[in-house]
Image: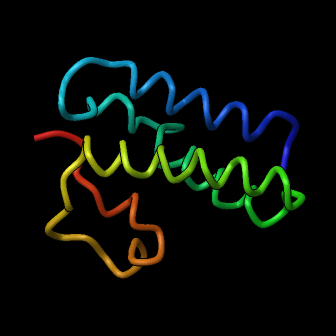
């Protein structure tokens, strides 16, 4: 991981979730976007010490709930995205 990777990933979600509306705008997914940020947080969880892992895990739970609420299931997802469910979500209506 690189310095401030978790903070940068969290700020990406903060920016995306601040946007009004029920659905996330497609610009939230432009690279690097929320999908990449969610990948970074997943990767960071493998290396964080136990206390930080619990804290980030609690944030991830809230992020995932909001992300799932503001996106729709992708009807044509591929197997690559099966383990990374956030890539199998539609960005906007």
Nearest to the observer: residue 49 or residue 25: 49
Give the left or right position of residue 2, taking residue 32 as reference.
right
Q: Nearer the viewer, residue 64 or 76?
A: 64
Residue sitting at the far bottom: 79
At 73% from the left and 56% from the top, the residue drawn is 54
Image height of 2 relative to 16, above or below: below
* Tag count: 0
How are the colours assigned in the image?
rainbow
Please state the horizontal and vertical placement of residue 64, each as a whole percent of the image: 43, 51
Residue 87 vs 78, above or below: the answer is above
Is residue 24 shown above or below 82?
above
Residue found at the very far left of the displayed protein: 93
Q: Is residue 52 left or right of residue 35?
A: right
Name the residue at 63% across, 37% down: 9
Relative image position of residue 93 (x, y in whole percent): 10, 41
The spot of residue 22 in percent (x, y) is 18, 31
Residue 90, compared with residue 4, is above or below; it is below
Q: Residue at x 57, y 44 (%)?
A: 37
Rendered image quadrant of residue 11: top right
Compare residues 44 and 78 and report the one nearer the observer.
44
> Residue, x 85% and y 43% (percent of image)?
2
Image location of residue 65, percent across then percent down = 38, 50
Q: Quadrant of residue 87?
A: bottom left
């Amino acid at each position: 991981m690189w310095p401030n990777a978790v903070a940068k990933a969290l700020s990406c979600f903060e920016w995306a979730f601040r946007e009004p509306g029920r659905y996330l705008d497609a610009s939230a997914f432009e690279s690097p976007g929320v999908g990449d940020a969610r990948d970074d947080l997943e990767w960071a969880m493998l290396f964080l010490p136990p206390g930080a892992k619990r804290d980030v895990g609690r944030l991830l739970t809230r992020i995932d709930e909001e992300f799932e609420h503001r996106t729709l299931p992708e009807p044509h997802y591929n197997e690559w995205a099966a383990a990374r469910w956030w890539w199998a979500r539609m960005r906007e209506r």
